[in-house]
Image (cartoon, grey):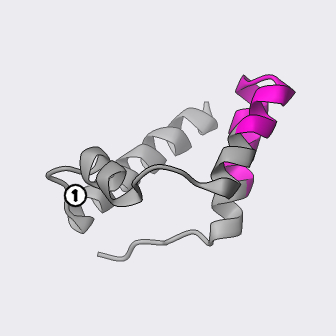
Amino acid sequence: MAVRVPREPEILHEATAVLVRHLSPSKVVRVLSAWQVGSGDYQATRDRLFAGETVDSLAEKVQQFESANANSADE
C-alpha cells in the first residue's frame, strides 16, 4: 500500500487556512503561538489520540477521508 505523506509546510499551510476560516484572528494567533511554544506531554497525547491504531489502520482512515473529500469537492 502506497501512502503519500505530505510535507510539513503543506500541512501547516492547510491547518492555518482552516483556523483562519473558523476562528477570529486573535484566536488564530493564540493557537499558532501555543504551537510554537509547545506544551504538555506529546507522547501521552499521541497515545490517547491513537490508542489501538496501527500505521495501516491510520493510512486506511486517511485514504477514506481523502476519498470522501474528493467526492464532495466534485459536487
Q: Is residue 16 highlighted in magenta? A: yes
Which residue has dot 1 on it?
57
Task: Compare residues 47 and 11 and report the one nearer the observer.
Answer: 47
The reply, left or right, for residue 1 in relation to residue 4 is left
| Quadrant where the image shows the N terminus | bottom left
Q: Quadrant of residue 57?
A: bottom left
The local secondary structure at tag 1 comes to helix
Q: Residue furthest right?
A: 25
Q: Which amino acid type is shown beneath numbered disc 1?
A: Ser
Q: Residue furthest bottom?
A: 2
| Quadrant where the image shows the C terminus | top right
Q: Total of numbered circles in the picture?
A: 1
Q: Majority secondary structure of the magenta segment?
A: helix
Q: Residue furthest left?
A: 52
Task: Compare residues 29 and 19 and report the one nearer the observer.
Answer: 29
Image coords of residue 18 (percent x, y): 69, 37
Crowd around label 1: few <14 · some 14–19 · many ≥20 (10 Å)? few
- Who's the residue at 63% across and 68% down the image? 8
* Relative vertical location of residue 5 with respect to residue 23 in this rendering, above or below: below
Image coords of residue 36 (percent x, y): 69, 56
Q: Is residue 40 highlighted in magenta? A: no
- Who's the residue at 59% across and 55% down the image? 38
Q: Quadrant of residue 6?
A: bottom right
Image coords of residue 44 (percent x, y): 30, 53
- Who's the residue at 62% across and 37% down the image? 73
Image coords of residue 30 (percent x, y): 74, 36
Task: Compare residues 61 and 21 and report the one nearer the observer.
Answer: 21
| Residue numbers of the magenta segment | 13-30
